[in-house]
Image (spheres, grey):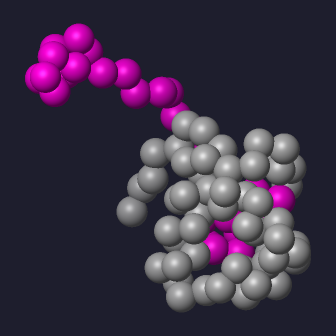
Amino acid sequence: MAELVRSPKQLGVALRRFRRMRDLTQAELAKRAGVRQGTVSQVETGLETVKLTTVMDLLRALDLELVIQPRTKGSHSDIEDIF
């Protein structure tokens, strides 16, 4: 299941979703990633000052990977279809 992430808040929501899918508590994920439980909480709430290495440790602990690709953009007709 792919997850589109464009902000720290969206990243936190995605990580929380995957953590819960794996039936892990924040404390269990923190132990696997080698960070504090409070750090997991900060990432999941979208704290913008979290270190990249911390995010990578959490991704590794959840058996996830980061994929970089060009940003998708909708056309004007896509937006008009919404209304």
- Judge left or right: residue 74 versus residue 12: left
Task: Using the image as rendered, state which of residue 66 and residue 32 is in the foreground.
Answer: 32
Residue 61 placed where, x, y %? 71, 75
Q: Which residues are magenta?
A: 54-83
Report how many numbered discs are placed on residues in the image.
0
Residue at the location (37% across, 22% down)? 73
Residue at the location (75% across, 68% down)? 40
In magenta stretch: residue 58: yes
Residue at the location (73% across, 87% down)? 28
- Judge left or right: residue 28 versus residue 67: right
* Residue 66 shows up from this direction: no
Task: Using the image as rendered, state which of residue 83 and residue 51 is in the foreground.
Answer: 83
- Judge left or right: residue 65 versus residue 22: right
Vertical comparison of 21 with 65: above or below: below
Q: Quadrant of residue 8?
A: top right
Q: Check the image and name the residue furthest to the top.
A: 76
Residue at the location (61% across, 86% down)? 24
Q: Quadrant of residue 44?
A: bottom right
Q: Please identify the quadrant where the C terminus is shown.
A: top left
Residue 20 placed where, x, y %? 52, 79
Residue 46 placed where, x, y %? 68, 50
In magenta stretch: residue 37: no
Q: Quadrant of residue 74?
A: top left
Vertical comparison of 76 with 79: above or below: above
Q: Please identify the quadrant where the N terminus is shown.
A: bottom left
Task: Using the image as rendered, state which of residue 65 and residue 7 is in the foreground.
Answer: 7
